[in-house]
Image (tube, rainbow, N blue to C red):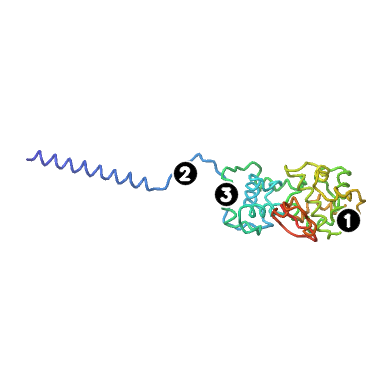
Amino acid sequence: MRKINLWILAGVILLSASSYRLILMTNEDKAEPRIEQNAEAVPTFSQNIVTSGAYGQDVYELQGRLKYLGYYYGKIDSHFGPKTLGSVKWFQSEFGIQVDGVVGPKTKLKLYNATKDWRPTEPGPGQAAGGNSSSGTNTGGNSGNNGSSGNNSMGSTNSLGLTENEIKIMANAVYGEARGEPFEGQVAVAAVILNRVESPQFPNTPSGVIFQPGAFTAVADGQIYLEPNEQARKAVMQALDGWDPSGGCLYYFNPKTATSKWIWSRPQVKTIGQHIFCM
């Protein structure tokens, strides 16, 4: 009888141990999955709302992700300037978000989900900040400063290394296309030409952009050969100094004279004078 009791006691102990082990395994299954220790660290947006004029890591990531998708063609300089603003509005328009240029939770989520494979390929904010003045590239960061003070540095830089002939043909285009427009509108036309030069969708020189078949009305009707005034040249130099009133646009049109249905389908950014500027 005593042996039987010992066997029963041993069985109860064994059964209790097995049950305890089963409970532990069940709890482990319910626990959150472990993050791989060797997973590559990728920047993710902070909770801050990012708006025009901002600078830092969020803008760096914003520009990088937009560039990954093909919505941003400028230098990743961590400055939320006009080019970045135009790119954000373009992205918002294409993804069905309110086109306000404000990078809030909805825009961040859409952008993150569309660029999960993105990885940083250029220096971050701390490294890029010192290179803006020497690079002289027509970037959003520069334009944010030059828009108000550019009149004091007229013709001081030629960031693209353009020849005098290229500057002259740009002035011809501005004069032929927008001589009746406000000065801001003339600078915007020059900026569109430069934006196209930087975009892989267009030729990589001002003359190539201007004389691309069907690109500009002034070329088609011969007004490109009119002698430009000093204001047209100043508009070109302002654009070269970084002022982009168009907000990074690649197209513009006069709604009173436009005959192309396609141009009306482009995401519109702003209106200056008689011209609507769009992406």
Q: Position of residue 185 (x, y in %)?
A: 81, 57
Q: Quadrant of residue 254?
A: bottom right
Check the picture and name the quadrant holding the N terminus: top left
Which amino acid type is marked by label 3? Tyr
Per the image, label 1 sits on a secondary structure element best described as helix
Which amino acid type is marked by label 2? Ile
Which amino acid type is marked by label 1? Gln
Q: Quadrant of residue 188?
A: bottom right
Return the mark for residue 35.
Answer: 2
Q: Position of residue 115 (x, y in %)?
A: 59, 46
- Which of labels 1 and 2 is toward the front? 1
Q: Which residue is mark 3?
A: 112
Direction from residue 99 to residue 139 in the image, left or right: right
Per the image, label 3 sits on a secondary structure element best described as helix
Q: Position of residue 103 (x, y in %)?
A: 62, 56
Which of pointers 2 and 3 lies earlier in the amino acid sequence?
2
Q: Which residue is mark 1?
A: 231
How much space separates mark 3 and mark 1, taking CA atoms?
Answer: 43 Å
Contact (Cβ within 8 Å) of mark 3 with mark 1: no
Give neighbour class at mark 2: few <14, some 14-19, many 20+ (Cα, 10 Å): few
Direction from residue 166 to residue 260 in the image, left or right: left
Question: Is residue 5 or residue 269 the one in the foreground?
Answer: 269
Above/below status of 90 relative to 201: below
Direction from residue 221 to residue 262 in the image, left or right: left
Q: Outermost residue toward the right?
A: 227
Residue plotted at (58% across, 47% down): 114
